[in-house]
Amino acid sequence: MSEKKEPLVIREEAGTIYYCLCGKSSKLPYCDNSHEGTDCKPYELIIEKSREVSICTCGETSNPPFCDGSHFNC
Ligand code: FES
């Protein structure tokens, strides 16, 4: 039986955040520009007010980079 991959819950401060969507970043869930030379682009999110977000770690979400509860089906 494989271990369920729970979402990563992190607190983001107000500002512009770039989440990695290519999977190559060494600073996941954040972009470190490792996508350069590929067709992939990071997901830009402007956070107006500090808040907690749930980041998908199972790869099954339909709303990347955020958890949509799909890990319950993994
Ligand atoms: S390093 Fe993955 S999108 Fe930038």
Image (cartoon, rainbow, N blue to C red):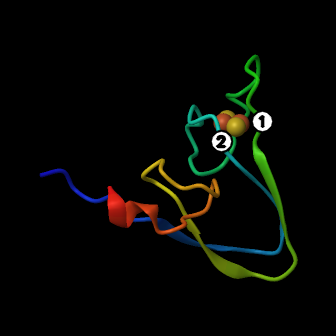
Image vertical order of residue 24 relative to residue 50, above or below: above
At label 2, which amino acid type do we have? Answer: Leu
Tell me if label 2 and label 1 are in contact, CB under 8 Å: yes
The disc placed on residue 72 is none
Q: Observer-nearest residue: 19 or 39?
A: 39
Quadrant of the frame with the C terminus: bottom left
Side (left or right) of 41 relative to 69: right
Element under disc 2 = loop
Measured along the vertical axis of the image, is residue 48 above or below residue 32?
below
Q: Residue at x 22, y 56 (%)?
A: 3
Mark on residue 21?
Answer: 2
Say whether residue 32 is visible: no
Q: Quadrant of residue 68?
A: bottom right
Sequence-earlier tag: 2 or 1: 2
**Label placed on residue 41:** 1
Mark 2 sits near ligand 1, with its Cβ under 8 Å away: yes
Name the residue at 48% across, 51% down: 60
* Mark 2 and mark 1: Cα distance apart in space: 7 Å
* Residue 39 at least partly seen: yes
Q: How many C-alpha atoms fall within 10 Å of the one at disc 2: few (<14), some, or many (≥20)?
A: some
Where residue 58 appears, as percent x and y from the top left, is: 42, 52
Q: Quadrant of ligand 1?
A: top right
